[in-house]
Image (cartoon, coloured by chain):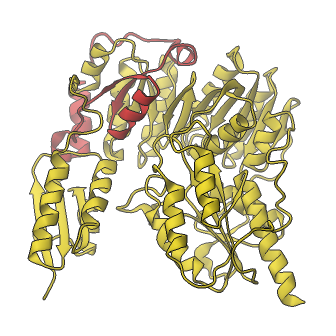
Chain colours: A yellow, B red
Amino acid sequence: MSDVLVNEIRRGFYLDSVALMRLSREVAGAEGVIEAALMMGSPSNLAIMRDAGLIEAGCDARPNDLVLGLRARDAAAAEAARALALEGLDRPRASAAAEDWRPRSIAAATEALPAANLALVSVPGDFAATEARRALGRGLNVLMFSDNVALEDERSLKLEARERGLLMMGPDCGTAILNGTPLAFANRVARGAVGIVGASGTGIQEVSCLVSEAGRGISHAIGVGGRDLKHEIGGITTMMALELLDADPATDRIVLISKPPHPEVAAAVLDRIAQSAKPHVVCFIGADPMDLPPGATQAFTLHEAAEMALDGARIGAGFSPDAAPRDMQGERRAGRIEGLFCGGTLAAEAQIVLRRAGRNPVSNAPVPGVAHVGDGAAGDRVLDLGADEYTRGRPHPMIDPSVRDEMLARALGDDAVGAILLDLVIGFGAHDDPAGQTAEVLAAHAGPRPPVVASVTGTAADPQDKARQAATLRAAGIVVAPSNAQASALAVTLAQTARAEAAS
Amino acid sequence: MPADTSQTPSGAARLLTEKIAVVNVGLDGFVADLRANAVEVVHVDWAPPAGGDPEMAALLARLGG
């Protein structure tokens, strides 16, 4: 019997991409379904569905139509899955409490909520700049989670925001904590005196969580968007954020996290830092040692940045990355390190740790000095699974780690792998139970496997509870390190010791 | 542009001292997270404007605010 293909188009029906991906997974997991997707009918989405064989030739869906495509083993399964999908589309959305009146525009929303001081914009990138302009025009600060926004739009939005005395965080700003409120992908951290300015969402998350779990706290963490320190943008939001935290009485020290900025932007930022009486920690992940103004210190990893913000207190003092834990599971063998990351900056930090230990990793998102994964080297591999090539048409692995599950399953069975290195990022926005899902992959594996080392970026106060996540990982035979840098260092130890043992 | 685009010069600084109140435009899932943190939030019932054509939508926004 041949597969059955079902297409259905709902004209003028919109659902956000995360809600659609969740529903797609639910339908794809139904009995007898081979593959399924629900997407808005943009040209790029239609191309993805066509490549997957999920739409018929001549599909005339338009960008504001919702498209269901599914392939099932037989007509009965197809019909059941179709009914499930349609029922899912009509399910009330999370935001729709019974008393809710939902305005159709930002203007109407600000009238309904005159105290509003921030717009959280996460519409598709093509439309994000237009909505952000509307928000700025209404006197709202903007946190723009959307990506795929043109650089010239980013620049003009940031200039307009500065002109209006407003903060334009993003595009591609994943994380902020303002006045104790976690926004987008952020964690419930303790309040305190450490201020953070970050061009990296997972960088902010790791540092804020390490500081919080060490008993100190965060005043504010201001996300600026991944491109703010590029030459074209000139650090407009970073400079405003540094000014704000410098003037903020609740902040007594400031941590700045970014990829290495453009040299002219770096010089301007360091000039601003030199004017401040507050101590600064500068963490430009992948940068060479720099001359910094007095009062500023350079951190080369997120772990170091957090320790410096803690006046040099050791994080994870009871953990030794220099020796394999006695109860470690997995077969010690010579092999490469396979790093499978959800967090881009955590993948960058792992590369720094591996490089400092004299190893030569390759990566799809290489830091300066690391080769691209496509260049053919057979050594350690550090993959950022949140990069575009892994998230085309699928959810980011922080929302749904399935893309990593498949790669983890392969790495467990690969006898060329000497250690597997993972990050788990919890908090608001993230998957409900990433540790449980990872544990299932290990449980499904039969036969020998290499050791697996992980860290959990989060806090005990997060909805997923860091301690519970760590316990689930340990029960699955995974070594849990106190930080991503320490997990990376332990992976190096395991690979190097195994190499020495294999040579002797 | 609407007539009442009053500038808020200290809007950025007030973000660090005032209670955060959010207009959410886009992902529905953020609303529940914000409410879990006791943040006042209004969710805009957004759909792609102008039949999903971004250029037309931007043009309409410039014309009509």
| Vertical order, A178 against A364 (above or below) | above
- Using the rendered view, name the quadrant where residue A494 is placed: bottom right
> Can residue A418 be seen?
yes
Q: Which image quarter is the N terminus of chain A in?
A: bottom left
Give residue A221's position: percent from left, percent from top: 61, 31
Residue in the picture at 70% in, 38% down: A213
Pick whichever, A55 or A307, lies toward us.
A307
Q: Which residue is drawn at 70% across and 72% down?
A: A329
Question: Does residue B49 appear to the left or right of A480 in the view shown?
Answer: left
Q: Position of residue A57 (x, y in %)?
A: 12, 73
Q: Nearer the viewer, residue B34 or A329?
A: A329
Judged left or right of residue A362, residue A360 is right
> Quarter-wise, where is residue A282 in the image?
top right
Q: Nearer the viewer, residue A65 or B43?
A: B43
Quadrant location of the C terminus of chain A?
bottom right
Tell me where residue A373 appears, x and y as whole percent. Answer: 60, 74
Q: Residue at x 71, y 62 (%)?
A: A351
Q: Picture coordinates of residue A189 (x, y %)?
A: 62, 32
Up/down of A231 relative to A454, above or below: above
Residue A56 appears anywhere in the view: no
**How many numbered marks are there?**
0
Q: Is residue A88 above or below residue A427?
A: below
Foreground: B60 or A237? A237
Give the left or right position of residue A338, taking residue A97 as reference: right
